[in-house]
Image (tube, rainbow, N blue to C red):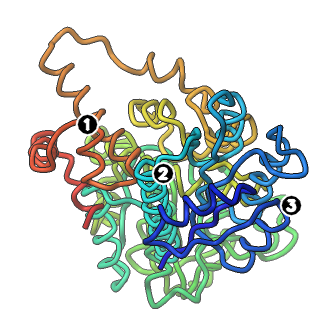
Amino acid sequence: MEKVLVVDDDLGIQKQLKWSFSDFEVLFADDRAGAIAQLRRHEPKVVTLDLGLPPDPANATEGLKTLAEILSLAPQTKVIVVTGNNDKENALKAINLGAYDFYQKPIDSDTIKVIVNRALNLYQIEEENRQLSQSAATMGSIIGTSEAIQKASRMAEKVAKTNISTLILGESGTGKEVFARHIHDSSERRNKPFIAINCASIPENLLESELFGYERGAFTGANKTTKGKIECANQGTLFLDEIGDMPIGLQAKMLRFLQERIIERIGGRQEIPVDIRVICATHRNLSKMADDETFREDLFFRISEISINIPPLRERGSDIMLLAKSFLSNYNQEYNQNLKGFSEDAIAAMMQYSWPGNIRELQNKLKSSIIMAEGAMITADDLGLTHDASMAKSTRLNLREVREEAESNAIRAAYQLSEQNISRTAELLGVTRPTLYSLIDKYNLGELKTAEN
């Protein structure tokens, strides 16, 4: 039986709640010390907490301290605070500190039972999500259930088993290097070097020496023989990010290396064989650049034996919230914070925003919001999306399009608020489960079904 801890110094309330929670193993404590002792020993998932505890039962001070201590020791615990009829202010303080819900006396057995059951269900869903996030982290940090990201992940898994040259396409910030590392970590070269170089961040006159290395005396300042990135990646993987920005003059030398798997250092005459996997990435349209003769067509075909398209964040649906929750968990640890999640307006804003900077922008906004947040939940204002979200939405006059967008956004938001539970999503939307499935099909929200399975 699941355990529920009742923290209340009123024996009458204790007896009533024990009778109400007949489906649970009920634990009791009548003060803060007793509550913490029971929490450490039994680790209950749900706690009901009377704010009026001794030694100051007339005020909420001791109850609020007990709440803070419970959540500091077991932050995932769902705490339901029990207050008097005229104590709404302290109930709201408790919610701001991280309480799951509050209930005003007198106790109604049926109502409090429903609240406790909902709290337990939410705890279990969050625990499943945490386990899924941990599993995702061990699979190369590719997080997402959308059809597009699953397709890209399957392609990466297949590519990892070969040495074929791979081109990863996607907007800036979509996680192209994450995919490249995932391919490397899933391959037989996983214990060998993974060397990444950004072709756009290195001046043209230095990029060649960075890639191919140089012999001593090859140019002014070359005081010793130095290996290039290609040679350093021998037996492993070379990741050429933003290859679309590689100077046209260097592309011919790169093509020869890809064809022959042989390099010569600058100023040298010795041919050096290298055995590496090559993965390239770009946000540019290389096919069009080849047509415009700003990128070598033969090099384009050589590096794109297989192409993997990474979808922009705005096209990944509920993946936005999966990523946000994963980042929140990581940043809570990094910055020693204990934020519980996202408010309703934050979820709506994140789902509506266009994310021009993609995952990198989401990470940056979450980092700043964790530092700036004043409550237990991150709000749209904390994220800086209150204004941006409204500005990002284009003004359209076609009522059908506006209605369809509003309905699909409402479904996604309800899905996140219900913690990816289809039945609860339907309840929030006020429709039946079959109707919700019809709407999911109508608006091509297949990632919701995928997540449920």
Give the structural element (helix, strand or loop) at label 2.
helix
Q: Residue at x 47, y 47 (%)?
A: 108
What residue lies at 32% left-to-right and 77% top-to-bottom?
A: 159
Q: Position of residue 236 (x, y in %)?
A: 54, 83
Query: Which residue corresponds to the image point at 47% horizontal and 61% vertical from the top-left?
Result: 20
Seen in the image, is 368 located left or right of residue 433?
right
Query: Which residue is under mark 1?
Result: 429
x and y, in percent, of residue 125 in the image: 43, 63
Cα–Cα span, label 3 and label 2: 77 Å
Q: Is residue 31 above or below residue 349?
A: below
Mark 2: give few (<14), some (14-19) or many (20+) Cα within 10 Å. many
State the separation of the CA atoms marked 1 and 3.
69 Å
Q: Amino acid at mark 1?
A: Leu
Of tags 3 and 2, the one toward the viewer is 2
Which mark sits nearer the N-terminus, 1 or 2? 2
- Front-most of 412 and 211? 412
Q: Amino acid at mark 3?
A: Gly
* Relative image position of residue 285 (x, y in whole percent): 33, 43
N-terminal label among 1 and 3: 3
Report the mark closest to the observer, 1 or 3.
1
Q: Determine which residue is flagged by label 2.
A: 112
**Quarter location, residue 91:** top right
Q: Are marks 1 and 3 in contact (CB under 8 Å)?
A: no
Pointer 3 or 2: first along the chain: 2
